[in-house]
Image: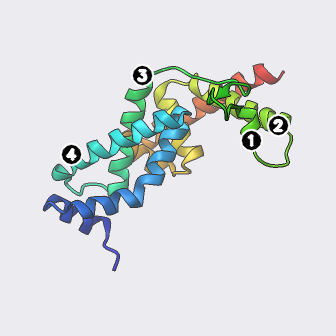
Amino acid sequence: MNLSDFELIQKVQKGDAQAFEELVYRYDEKVLNMALSFRNSADDAKDIYQEVFIRAFKGLKNFKFKSEFSTWLYRITSNVCISYNDKKNRTNHDSIDKRINDGEDSATFADLIEGTEKTDSKVIGSEIGSKIKAALDTLPSQQKLAFTLKFYEELKIKEIAEIMNCAEGTVKRYLFNATNKMKNHLKRIYD
C-alpha cells in the first residue's frame, strides 16, 4: 500500500526514518536532474542533491502542509542551486584525449566511448550541447532557474511561480528574457 506524501510527512514528523527514505526515493531523480541541468556537472549535482535532502530532512519537522511537498522540495532545490551557483560559478572540461589511469590499463576518454557512431559526430553533438549549456550559464540565476524548470523539468508556469515564490507574470518575464538572451548568444556563435 502506497502512502501519500501527506501521510509520509506525518510519519517523518513522528520520527519514522523509513518514511523519509520513501520520500527521497520518490523525488530523488527529479532533484538530481534539476541540479544537473542547472550546474552541468555530475559532481556538483550530487553535492546539491545531498544538500537538498539534508535541508529537507531538517525542515520537515516544521512543514505546515501549506503547499504540496513537491513544490516545497523544488523550492529548496532551486535555492540550493542558486546559492551553489553563486559560490561555485565555474566550468571544467577535460579533453577527450586526457589519459585516465596512468598505469598499465591507461586509456583516453575517446577510447572509452562506446558505439558505432564516429567520435567526431559525438564530439560535435556534445559541442552543441556544451554551447547551449554555456549560453544557459550566462543567464542571471533567476532566469536560469525559470528556464531550467520550464524546459528541462517541463513544469507549468504556475508550478514554477510557486517554487520561485513569485507571480506567474514574473516567471513569464524571466522566461521571455532568458529565451531572448539564449537565442542571441547562440546566434552569435552560429552566424
**Label ID, residue 86:** 3
Sequence-earlier tag: 1 or 4: 4
Q: Disc 2 marks which residue?
A: 119
- The image shows residue 108 at horizontal and vertical percentages of 71, 30
**On screen, 163 above or below 104?**
below
Q: Residue shown at 39%/60% (left/top)?
A: 25
Q: Residues within 10 Å of mark 3 (few under 14, many from 20)?
A: few
Residue in the foreground of this view, choosing between 34 and 107? 107
- Which residue is painted at 39% across and 41% down in the image? 77
Crowdedness near tag 1: few (<14), some (14–19) or many (≥20) residues, C-alpha within 10 Å: few
Numbered tag placed on residue 113 in the rendering: 1
User: Is the residue under label 2 in contact with that under label 1 (CB below 8 Å)?
Assistant: yes
Which quadrant of the rendered structure holds the N terminus? bottom left
The image quarter in which residue 117 lies = top right
- Select label 4 or label 2 by which is in front: 2
Q: Label 4 neighbourhood size at 10 Å, few (<14), some (14-19), many (20+)?
A: few
Q: As shown in the figure, which amino acid type bears the numbered disc 2?
A: Thr
Residue 58 numbered mark, or none: 4
Q: Quadrant of residue 113?
A: top right
Q: What residue is drawn where x is 37% and y is 51%?
A: 71
- Which residue is outermost to the front? 104
- Badge 2 or badge 3: first in the primary sequence: 3
Q: Amino acid at mark 3?
A: Asp
